[in-house]
């Protein structure tokens, strides 16, 4: 599952502390069926394609987390529900997020 969002500028300074792996992801890693959690931040890049170098601007929410899970049932479990409400995220960051997106992808 991939969760992406933007954060209001006044709360961006809080992101590193509120989303640090030991505090937040440790709770999620204790949930049965969660195999890994990775934070990512969108960035512009250049790539060669069709014989040319193309510059690509990042499009969409900048901040994302990738949750490697056993299946969609993990996301509706009681342990998941409890883990995502732990720590500073629910009260100090989530209310200031916008452009939130959630998507589920299956590895083939």
Image (cartoon, rainbow, N blue to C red):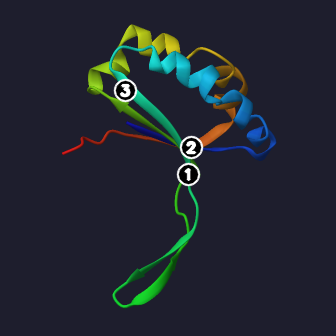
Looking at the rendering, which quadrant does residue 44 occupy?
bottom right
Residue closest to the far bottom: 51
Task: Tell me the mark number nearer the camera, choosing from 2 and 3.
Answer: 3
Q: Regarding mark 1 in the picture, which secondary structure is present there?
A: loop
**Residue lying at 69% horizontally and 28% vertically, measured from the top left:** 18
CA separation in Å, label 2 and label 3: 22 Å
Earlier-in-chain disc, 2 versus 3? 2
The residue wearing badge 2 is: 5
**Residue lying at 43% horizontally and 16% vertically, measured from the top left:** 80
Q: Give the answer, above or below, for where 85 lies relative to 71.
A: above
Q: Give the answer, above or below, for where 35 lies relative to 15.
A: above
Earlier-in-chain disc, 1 versus 3? 3
Dot 1 and dot 2 residues touching (CB under 8 Å)? yes
CA separation in Å, label 1 and label 2: 5 Å
**Residue lying at 28% horizontally and 20% vertically, measured from the top left:** 73
Looking at the image, residue 11 sits to the left or right of residue 55; the answer is right
The image's mark for residue 99 is none
CA separation in Å, label 1 and label 3: 24 Å
The residue wearing badge 1 is: 61
The residue wearing badge 3 is: 35
Q: Regarding mark 2 in the picture, which secondary structure is present there?
A: strand
Specify few, some or many for label 1: CA neighbours under 10 Å numbering under 14, 14-19, or 20 or more. Answer: some
Residue 60, image x, y percentages: 52, 57
Residue 10, image x, y percentages: 81, 41
């Amino acid at each position: 599952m991939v969760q992406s969002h933007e954060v209001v500028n006044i709360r961006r300074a809080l992101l590193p502390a509120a989303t640090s792996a030991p505090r937040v992801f440790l709770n999620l890693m204790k949930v049965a069926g969660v195999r890994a959690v990775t934070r990512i931040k969108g960035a512009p890049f250049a790539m060669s394609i069709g014989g040319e170098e193309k510059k690509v601007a990042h499009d969409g929410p900048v901040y994302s987390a990738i949750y490697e899970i056993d299946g969609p049932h993990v996301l509706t479990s009681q342990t998941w529900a409890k883990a995502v409400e732990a720590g500073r995220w629910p009260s100090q960051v989530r209310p200031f997020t916008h452009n939130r997106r959630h998507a589920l992808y299956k590895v083939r």
